[in-house]
């Protein structure tokens, strides 16, 4: 790739002074929840985080593998300790993950449930009730081993385009190596129904997908991260361009990359309005720095490679799964969480592989704080989420583990730090303004987040966007809808979630 000199690495290296303390409150969950099962559940284990009863406190829907998936209803008091009760979700096993979104734009979040077997799409109802709408909406559930999902509203569409990523073809007797199943895209055909699946060929054992406007041209592309363990080096990371679903050709700006692709995280770290991308893998966790000229690999000095355990087992490489950027200390610099864990008993992988909490410093480099912050669990982490679960302005953490209980952590916060939340609402279709970009600026700099559905590892969120503001008491905020010109800047006070009507 091109030579790279990151502007945030020009300054002298500064150690990160503070990291918040997380207190594990797993014991406060109403039941123990474990993601487990045979090889079909070596991967997956996602968690969906979304508010399904309108109380501004997010619920958790956790995949169970061979165990039933479970819905946990948030019973926390704002600003108090985390409390959950068990919800009454449809009983289903074989679940690898789930993603929330308002498919039919009725103002109530629905749930796309991924499975090793027929996927399900649940229509959300009042007070966290769900009914299976897969057939009603004409969605081909298939019978594949589905491990990835993303969605976007294309121009002029009333319903979202849905992308499903599939792993190994379990019916191919020549497998599992070299027998990757094909991925599919479903487009709405009108009257609340979907057309026949469109095959994305070739497909290479996908574990994460994300629709994102990665180059800032107002048109989203579909990034696909693939696991080389089963495509046997015949595949690579992919980008599919809308509207024709053509694969992006390799170039100096989009280099052929072959990794054990497991998760995607995306957020602007440089302030130029273009999202950087974090790709989890076995061994090196790889960050791509985005610019008008395309992607470049971040240098080793940035501190995000996290290729070996920082405590415990030094005998093998780390294996990354869910990754997510989030400002856990509200200092106006996004940090990075990576769930870690051996696939099962792979000898080249570390057996005790603690999660990473990589704190971003003033110079843009990242420092490990997983152990000191209290989130460096040695269990086999899979899906996860950073989310404010008790409405106190601090990002808490949930981690789904394979063959070990799901863990819940409460962020205790730090004094003197402020934040702001942005909750977009749009009239008509695409009520959550998926594809929009939200910019926040203060005297200390600019931040941007994109409203997306997808990425991570087998799970995602539908929540207000959270921005740390440091010691600032307010910020200017601007919203740009997908494919539209930027809206006006407006000044908003810190310390609360602002509901903004996106025009």
Image: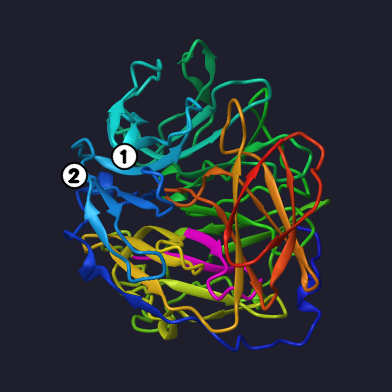
Q: Is residue 222 above or below residue 417?
A: above
Residue 9: percent from the left, percent from the top? 76, 77
Q: Which of 447 and 67 is in front in this view?
A: 447
- Residue found at x 26% / y 63%: 345
Which secondary structure lies at badge 2?
loop
Task: Specify whether residue 366 is painted magenta.
Answer: no
Q: In which quarter of the image is the C terminus?
A: top right
Kindly identify which residue carries mark 2: 68
Q: Nearer the viewer, residue 281 or 68?
A: 68
Circle nearer the viewer, 1 or 2: 1
- Magenta stretch, residue numbers: 323-341
Q: Is 231 situated left or right of 277 in this image?
A: left
Report which quarter residue 402 is drawn in.
bottom left
Q: In this view, does 96 lie above or below 414?
A: above
Kindly identify which residue carries mark 1: 127
* Measured Cα–Cα span from mark 1 to mark 2: 21 Å
The image's colour scheme reads rainbow
Q: Earlier in the sequence, mark 1 or mark 2?
A: 2
């Amino acid at each position: 790739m091109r030579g790279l000199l990151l502007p945030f690495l020009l300054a002298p290296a500064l150690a990160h002074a503070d990291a918040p303390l997380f207190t594990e409150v797993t014991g406060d969950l109403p039941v123990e929840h474990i993601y487990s099962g045979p090889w079909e559940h070596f991967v997956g284990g996602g968690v969906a985080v979304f508010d399904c009863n309108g109380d501004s406190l997010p619920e958790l829907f956790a995949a169970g593998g061979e165990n039933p998936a479970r819905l946990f209803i948030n019973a926390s008091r704002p600003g108090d300790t985390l409390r959950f009760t068990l919800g009454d979700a449809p009983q289903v096993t074989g679940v690898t993950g789930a993603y929330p979104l308002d498919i039919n734009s009725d103002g109530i979040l629905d749930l796309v449930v991924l499975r090793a077997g027929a996927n399900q799409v649940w229509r959300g109802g009042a007070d966290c009730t769900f009914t299976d709408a897969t057939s009603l909406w004409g969605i081909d559930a298939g019978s594949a081993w589905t491990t990835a999902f993303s969605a976007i509203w294309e121009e002029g569409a009333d319903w979202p385009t849905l992308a499903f990523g599939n792993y190994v073809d379990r019916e191919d007797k020549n497998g599992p190596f070299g027998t990757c199943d094909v991925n599919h895209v479903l487009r709405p055909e009108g009257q609340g129904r979907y057309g026949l699946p469109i095959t994305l060929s070739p497909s290479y054992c996908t574990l994460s997908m994300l629709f994102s406007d990665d180059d800032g041209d107002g048109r989203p592309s579909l990034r696909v991260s693939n696991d080389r363990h089963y495509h046997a080096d015949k595949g690579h990371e992919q980008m599919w361009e809308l509207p024709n679903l053509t694969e992006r050709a390799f170039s100096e700006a989009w280099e052929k990359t072959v990794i054990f692709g497991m998760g995607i995280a995306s957020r602007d770290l440089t302030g130029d309005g273009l999202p950087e991308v974090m790709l989890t893998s076995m061994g090196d966790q790889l960050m791509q720095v985005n610019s008008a000229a395309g992607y470049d690999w971040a240098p080793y000095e940035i501190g995000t490679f996290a290729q070996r355990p920082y405590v415990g087992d030094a005998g093998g490489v780390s294996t990354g799964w869910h990754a997510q950027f989030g400002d856990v200390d509200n200092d106006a610099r996004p940090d990075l969480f990576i769930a870690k864990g051996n696939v099962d008993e792979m000898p080249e992988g570390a057996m005790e592989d603690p999660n990473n909490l990589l704190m971003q410093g003033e110079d843009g480099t990242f420092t490990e704080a997983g152990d000191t912050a209290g989130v460096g669990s040695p269990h086999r982490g899979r899906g996860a989420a950073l989310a404010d679960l008790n409405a106190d302005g601090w990002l808490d953490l949930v981690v789904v583990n394979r063959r070990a209980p799901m863990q819940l952590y409460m962020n205790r916060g730090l004094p003197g730090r402020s934040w702001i939340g942005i909750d977009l609402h749009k009239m008509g279709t695409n009520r959550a303004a998926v594809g929009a970009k939200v910019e926040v600026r203060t005297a200390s700099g600019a931040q941007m987040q994109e409203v997306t559905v997808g990425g991570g590892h087998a799970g995602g969120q539908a929540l207000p966007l959270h921005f740390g503001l440091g010691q600032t008491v307010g910020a200017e905020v601007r919203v740009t809808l997908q494919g539209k010109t930027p809206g006006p800047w407006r000044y908003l006070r810190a310390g609360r979630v602002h509901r903004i009507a996106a025009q």
